[in-house]
């Protein structure tokens, strides 16, 4: 019964749009889809800032069996609508991960569905494994925009157990790849970050090889002198660097370059995947690491205490929802609107010092600052009656004193 059902499903697919990077997994998948589904394969690559990885991609895709390749420039949309939202939310998963891969998946998957609709495709396919988070992120987005779409996830269908098997498959079928048996870890890069996982990184006790990093110098090799930056925000969005206006993509690229020179943004963690297992990931996120520190510093003088605490509580849920793949879920859309509302007063400037892996906030200012030096000073002042604090303390101590009397009985 299972074999008949699978055969029928495969016969019903005439055209599939494959999310294609040209890396090991999707290169093998392109060939495998043609062989096992006997269907037309349209490849689609989203340019979210991976740069040189796009070179020669069309020729490679067609040589491996694709009927055509779409390369969609999503960099501006990615930074403007996704990365900046995460900055406004101060979104951090499990206290460390800045969500570079998680944020890229919904923008990629959304455009994949749009291309599938344009092409009249029966199905879409992706290269995510059956163990990871990306399968969830891709497919939740697919179904949010095309509820009846057929999804092909080769890692959940084929007999291959790991990337070593795929390297052998590629060698057998003359598929050009970069991965080797000696260096079998997986990387994923975009304008926001580069991630590394799998293979030689799966031992959480082993330090990542020094030569894997692409965006950042090690703190030991970073500049010996600190560098100061002034970042200006409007309603939580970074708009100027050292007084010069920059568009979203240019802003992130420049902060990545500067941060990388100073060894900013390296993270090595064991995270909890949505599917239930723990996974070791190594990340480089220099620009957003700088922005997170600067943004939080500006919020400290522009947001009311309780609004800030409410937003911080929202940040945890927002980060979790993004990590799990629920970007287009109604609760996440609601959180984005709420976060935007909190950011209306977050306009001003922040000065940071970068030095050997550290982002140190050294100044912040805003026209609408709630910070009042007259209230905060320890010097003589006449706008705050210190005697008023006695009643405030006694009112807050009332329940504590009641507990103490009860214990004394």
Image (cartoon, rainbow, N blue to C red):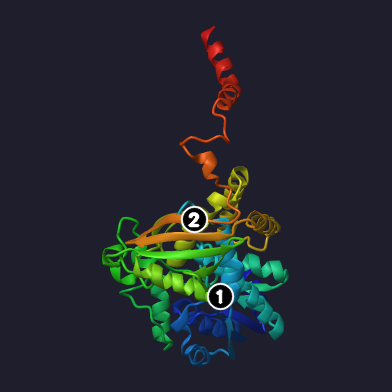
Residue located 61% across and 23% down the image:
395
**Horizontal and vertical percent position of residue 387:** 55, 25
**What number is the disc on residue 247?**
1
Disc assigned to residue 408: none
Q: Residue at x 49, y 93 (%)?
A: 59
Mark 1 surroundings within 10 Å by alpha-carbon count, few (fewer than 14), some (14 through 19), many (20 or more): few
Instruction: Name the residue carrying label 2.
Output: 364
Residue at image x 60%, y 86%? 42
Residue drawn 46% across and 36% down? 378
Question: What quarter of the picture does the C terminus occupy?
Answer: top right
| 44 and 248: which is toward the camera | 248
123 with respect to 31 (left or right): right
Q: What SS does tag 2 mark? A: strand
Q: Provide residue 146's location: percent of width, then percent of height.
A: 72, 71
Residue 407, relative to residue 73: is it above or below? above
| Above or below: residue 28 compared with residue 128 | below
| Viewer-proximal residue among 296 and 277 | 296
Whether residue 376 sits left or right of residue 124 in the image: it is: left
Cα distance between the residues tagged 1 and 2? 22 Å
Q: Nearer the viewer, residue 76 or 199?
A: 76
- Where does residue 100 sit, x and y in percent of width and height? 50, 65
């Amino acid at each position: 019964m299972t074999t008949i059902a699978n055969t029928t499903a495969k016969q019903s697919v005439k055209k599939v749009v494959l999310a294609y990077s040209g890396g090991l997994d999707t290169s093998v998948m392109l060939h495998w889809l043609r062989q096992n589904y006997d269907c037309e394969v349209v490849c689609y690559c989203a340019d979210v800032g991976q740069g040189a990885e796009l070179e020669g991609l069309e020729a490679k895709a067609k040589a491996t069996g694709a009927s055509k390749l779409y390369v969609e420039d999503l960099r501006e949309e990615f930074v403007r609508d996704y990365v900046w939202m995460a900055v406004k939310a101060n979104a951090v998963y499990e206290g460390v991960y800045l969500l570079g891969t998680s944020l890229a998946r919904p923008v990629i998957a959304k455009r994949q569905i749009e291309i599938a609709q344009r092409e009249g495709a029966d199905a879409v396919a992706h290269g995510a494994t059956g163990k990871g988070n990306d399968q969830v992120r891709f497919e939740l987005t697919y179904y949010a925009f095309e509820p009846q779409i057929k999804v092909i996830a080769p890692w959940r269908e084929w007999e291959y157990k790991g990337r070593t098997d795929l390297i052998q498959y590629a060698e057998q079928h003359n598929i050009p790849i970069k991965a080797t048996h000696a260096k079998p870890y997986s990387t994923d890069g975009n304008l926001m970050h580069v991630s590394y996982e799998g293979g030689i990184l799966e031992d959480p006790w082993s330090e990542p090889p020094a030569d894997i990093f692409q965006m950042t110098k090690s703190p030991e090799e970073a500049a010996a002198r600190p560098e100061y930056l002034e970042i200006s925000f409007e309603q939580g969005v970074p708009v100027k660097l050292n007084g010069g206006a920059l568009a979203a993509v240019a802003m992130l690229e420049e902060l990545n370059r500067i941060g990388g020179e100073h060894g900013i943004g390296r993270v090595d963690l064991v995270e909890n995947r949505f599917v239930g297992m723990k996974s070791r990931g190594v990340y480089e996120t220099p620009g957003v690491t700088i922005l997170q520190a600067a943004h939080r510093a500006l919020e400290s003088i522009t947001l009311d205490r309780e609004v800030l605490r409410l937003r911080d509580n929202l940040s945890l849920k927002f980060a979790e929802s993004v990590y799990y793949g629920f970007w287009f879920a109604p609760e996440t859309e609601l959180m984005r609107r709420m976060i935007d509302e909190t950011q209306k007063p977050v306009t001003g400037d922040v000065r940071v010092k970068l030095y050997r892996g550290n982002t140190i906030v050294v100044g912040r200012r805003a026209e609408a600052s709630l910070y009042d030096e007259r209230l905060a000073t320890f010097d003589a002042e006449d706008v705050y009656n210190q005697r008023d604090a006695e009643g405030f303390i006694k009112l807050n101590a009332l329940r504590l004193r009641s507990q103490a009397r009860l214990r004394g009985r």
